Amino acid sequence: MALEPHLIKLDLKGDERGSLIALEALRNVPFAIKRTYFIFGTLPGVRRGKHAHRRLRQLAVCVHGGCKIALDDGRSQATVELKSPDMALYVPPMLWHEMFDFSEGCVLLVLAEDHYDERDYIRNYEQFLLSVRK
Ligand code: TYD
């Protein structure tokens, strides 16, 4: 079966003054948020991510510009393009992800369910495949 990326459409509050989008834990974000980080200043041609998390759940939104995210659950793959601040990608545990094709000025905001913990990362693809197929 093909991998279906879990995209979440965010409610955009727009009026003549501009736009606003709210992210709320356990409402439009499917977990309680302990950490937020953002990726910006990426150089052309770079690929980031290249890992999966054992337990961590995350939500990614391109709040400015766009990028592509390649997803792999160990059985099938998909690529999504985030290019609008009202579209979020839910990244569950054990989903290999690689971000690439960042547009100039892209700011990728990520909400995470837990604090940073390197022990939660699987950074080796072969090891990821072994873990997922166990
Ligand atoms: P890295 O995992 O390489 O980023 P990406 O997933 O975008 O490829 O992280 C870059 C550095 O930042 C690395 O030294 C780990 C550190 N880091 C933190 O200290 N806190 C965090 O919340 C994150 C995501 C990374």
Image (tube, rainbow, N blue to C red):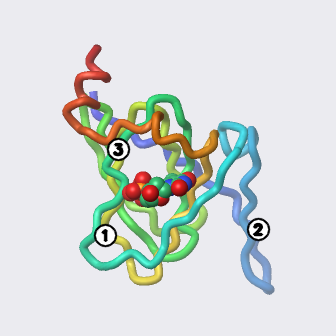
Q: Image quadrant for the C terminus? A: top left
Helix, strand or loop under label 3: strand
Helix, strand or loop under label 2: strand
Q: Position of residue 2 (x, y in %)?
A: 28, 33
Q: Given the image, on which type of amino acid does mark 1 rest? A: Asp
- Furthest residue to the left? 126
Pick the residue in front: 117 or 10.
117
Above or below, comparing residue 4 to residue 105 in the picture: above
Residue 88 seen = no
Q: Position of residue 58 (x, y in %)?
A: 55, 44
Pick the residue in front: 129 or 87.
129
Above or below, comparing residue 103 to residue 11 in the picture: below
Q: Earlier in the sequence, mark 2 or mark 1?
A: 2
> Which of the two discs, 3 and 2, sits closer to the camera?
3
Label 1: which residue? 101
Q: Position of residue 130 (x, y in %)?
A: 24, 23
Q: CA distance from mark 3 to mark 2?
A: 34 Å
Label 3: which residue? 51
Residue at 79% of width from left, 85% of height from top? 16
> Which of the two discs, 2 and 1, sits closer to the camera?
1
> Which of the two discs, 3 and 1, sits closer to the camera?
3
Asked if labels 1 and 2 touch by Cβ distance under 8 angstroms, the answer is: no
| Residue 42 location, quadrant | bottom left
Q: Which mark is residue 131?
A: none
Q: Given the image, on which type of amino acid does mark 3 rest? A: His
Q: Which mark is residue 13?
A: 2
